[in-house]
Image (cartoon, rainbow, N blue to C red):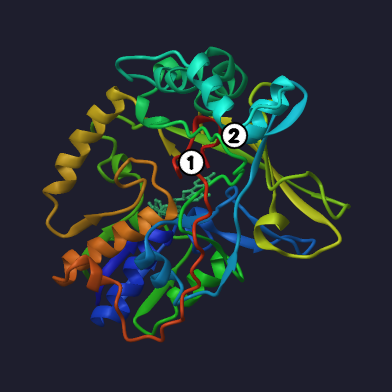
Amino acid sequence: MFDYLIVGAGFAGSVLAERLANGSGKKVLICDKRPHIAGNAYDYYNDDGILIHKYGPHIFHTNSADVFEYLGRFTEWREYQHRVLASVDGMLVPIPINLDTINKLYGLNLNAHEVQDFFDKVREKRETLRTSEDVVLNAVGKELYEKFFKNYTRKQWGLDPSELDASVTARVPTRTNRDDRYFTDIFQAMPKHGYTRMFEKMLDSPNIKIMLNCDYREIVKEIDFREMVYTGPVDSFFNHCYGKLPYRSLEFKHETHDTEVFQSAPVVNYPNDQAYTRITEFKYLTGQTHKKTGVVYEYPQAEGDPYYPIPRQENATIYAKYKALADIQTNVHFVGRLATYKYYNMDQIVAQALTQYGKIAGMKRKEAGTLKAKTASPMVYQNGNGNGNGNKSLTALS
Ligand SMILES: Cc1cc2nc3c(=O)[nH]c(=O)nc-3n(C[C@H](O)[C@H](O)[C@H](O)COP(=O)(O)OP(=O)(O)OC[C@H]3O[C@@H](n4cnc5c(N)ncnc54)[C@H](O)[C@@H]3O)c2cc1C
């Protein structure tokens, strides 16, 4: 007899399994239909001994000290500030757009004040920001929109920015300084020995049993449990009774190259040419030294594993119907990005799972991450002096 059946061993399921097992002494069975734990954050050593991320690059960044401290119990951290270049007009330039991007692109030598004037001059001010196109034009105007955003978005989503909600971009960070970091969160780091090792430690408890290669539907009738935590796609849970929720998928093409360094930045985006959106070189992220190097190309697809919920009003309407059904389930908790049909970063999912645990255990959110296990002292990385924000931009949704 288990207290909880947890469906999905990604961040949402694993944090809840750990908390319920170690925080409340519950017996937990966690299953995943994939042959591994860690969900989309899964990493492993490939045949050449290079640590790679199977489902594309995962970079940890957060402004939540709570979340950083909580995960720090299961891993040491390696400091890492992410940087991205975009291939535009035959040049590699920093993204988010900063002072160097503009100077290099246009052969100028502007200073911070002058580049602000440049942005003010080129932007096309909009009263209402309804679509992603509105957001970008309002921030950087038509030319930069076309160079960096328009085609990348079409590739990434299979839709024109004018067909996507404003929420996809929310804000386009433009910087008038030379800060070329992709994120500006307070805490930016990678698990020192990888995500999978961190998940192994999280799930290492006598109260947790793990079943892999196991779709919950195969066992749900055979196993005794009191409550379920469901982190899979919400529409699938209800047998698509209101129709399928659309997702954008990706195909990952991994390669090993017999050279120490493949490209000049951790990620290079290709907004306009090539069928792929970006190339990631993992050794920058993991800090591994190796005489070969591993890279991954990402090709957006309409079909395949569900990765990105598509933020359009008509989809939000369908999701609202599923949510109404989910809300009246008495013994099933819906947690995570697939179960709530929304793009979330890893830290947001950890926070969501800790909040959910707090609700189940009748605790406040702050107390929810507290446990008896040893507490590693968190490494704190201070924010630099960047004036951008951590919002994702259309050109580089991770
Ligand atoms: C390409 C890509 C890059 C990303 N990069 C970043 C990044 O750089 N930084 C960041 O913070 N976030 C990033 N993310 C987001 C990050 O992956 C998510 O926030 C995180 O994985 C969400 O965790 P989850 O547990 O909700 O979902 P998942 O990790 O998707 O876990 C859900 C699990 O449920 C399992 N499952 C589904 N249905 C069933 C079933 N019927 N039976 C059993 N198991 C089932 C699935 O196999 C899966 O393992 C990225 C996402 C993608 C797709």
**Is residue 306 or residue 261 the one in the foreground?**
261
For disc 1, does the CB lie below 8 Å from ligand 1? no
Q: Is residue 348 above or below residue 265?
A: below
Provide the residue designation for mark 1: 388
Residue at figure coordinates x 52%, y 46% from the top left: 386
SS for dot 1: loop
Residue 267 lies in quadrant? top right
Provide the residue designation for mark 2: 98
In the drawing, does residue 183 fall left or right of residue 16?
right
Q: Residues within 10 Å of mark 2 (few under 14, many from 20)?
A: many
In the drawing, does residue 257 fall left or right of residue 354?
right
Residue at figure coordinates x 50%, y 73% from the top left: 200
Residue 316 lies in quadrant? top left
Instruction: Please state the horizontal and vertical placement of residue 60, each as a whole percent of the image.
Output: 51, 57
Instruction: Please state the horizontal and vertical placement of residue 334, each as a whole percent of the image.
Output: 25, 53
Earlier residue among tags 1 and 2: 2
Instruction: Please state the horizontal and vertical placement of residue 385, each as a whole percent of the image.
Output: 52, 50
Q: Residues within 10 Å of mark 1 (few under 14, many from 20)?
A: many
Residue at figure coordinates x 42%, y 62% from the top left: 9
Discs 1, 2 touching: Cβ within 8 Å? yes
**Is residue 362 or residue 67 the one in the foreground?**
67
Quarter of the rendering occupied by the N terminus: bottom left
Q: Confirm whether residue 222 shows in the render.
A: no
In the drawing, does residue 293 fall left or right of residue 88?
right
SS for dot 2: loop
For disc 2, does the CB lie below 8 Å from ligand 1? no
Name the residue type under label 2.
Asn
Name the residue type under label 1.
Gly
Instruction: Please state the horizontal and vertical placement of residue 117, each as a whole percent of the image.
Output: 52, 21
